[in-house]
Image (cartoon, rainbow, N blue to C red):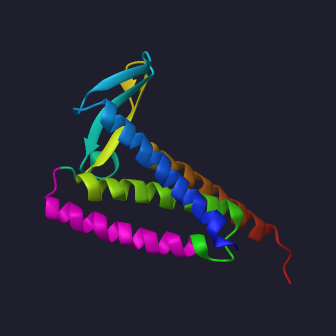
Amino acid sequence: MKRLPWLLLPISALAADYSSKLWILNHLHYQGDSITIIKGFLNLSLGFNKGAIFGTLHSAPEWLRVALFSLAGIAALIYFGRLFLADETPTLERVALGLILGGACGNGLDRILHGHVVDFLDFWFGTWQYWTFNLADSCIVVGAILFGIAMLRSRKAAETAPVE
């Protein structure tokens, strides 16, 4: 595997996430500020998440959040990074891992720079509002879905392989 071209995937995901958050922070200044993109469907709404997914742990003591997020982040970088760089990793898995790594680095960088994650994508479906999220979250979710598909494909291939 040639590593340099593959490293462009997580770096690009990180760069897209970082630049989108920089744009939002330059245009919206207070939590709750919003720009309507598609009325009744999509707003850009500035939010700060000190917690984990869906705001869990947001009220935990700061020292606990820092410790948990630091340990989890380092463990994820080591585990997913090792898989991402392994020569035997299939292409679909590598794409999935690159997105996961780029997204994790984007949210990790937010925690280092701001002490929280900057969220801004705010979708509505009728009267139901989805949790506000960012491009890093999107990369992680898409990467996880692709990784699941890759795992199912490899399992199916193993089940249908001829027995020697």
Q: Position of residue 48 (x, y in %)?
A: 26, 42
Residue 71 rendering spot, x and y as whole percentages = 31, 71
Where is residue 33 drawn, in percent x and y? 27, 27
Judge left or right: residue 91 versus residue 135.
right
Residue displayed at 34% across by 40% down: 119
| Residue 72 as seen in the image, left or right of residue 158 | left
Write the residue at 70% across / 68% down: 90
Q: Residue furthest bottom?
A: 164
Asked whether 36 falls inside the magenta stretch, the response is no
Q: Give the residues in magenta.
A: 59-83
In the rendered image, the residue lying farthest to the left is 61
Residue in the foreground of this view, choosing between 16 and 143: 16
Name the residue at 15% across, 59% down. 62
Can residue 143 be seen in the rendering of this structure?
yes
- The relative height of residue 122 versus residue 149 in the rendered view (above or below) is above
Q: Which residue of the protein is positioned furthest toward the top in this rendering?
A: 39
| Quarter occupied by residue 109 | bottom left
User: Which image quarter holds the N terminus?
Assistant: bottom right
Q: Position of residue 161 (x, y in %)?
A: 82, 72
Res. 134 image quadrant: top left
* 130 displayed left or right of 99: left
> Does the stretch in magenta take in 73?
yes
Q: Is residue 144 visible?
A: no
Q: Residue furthest front?
A: 26
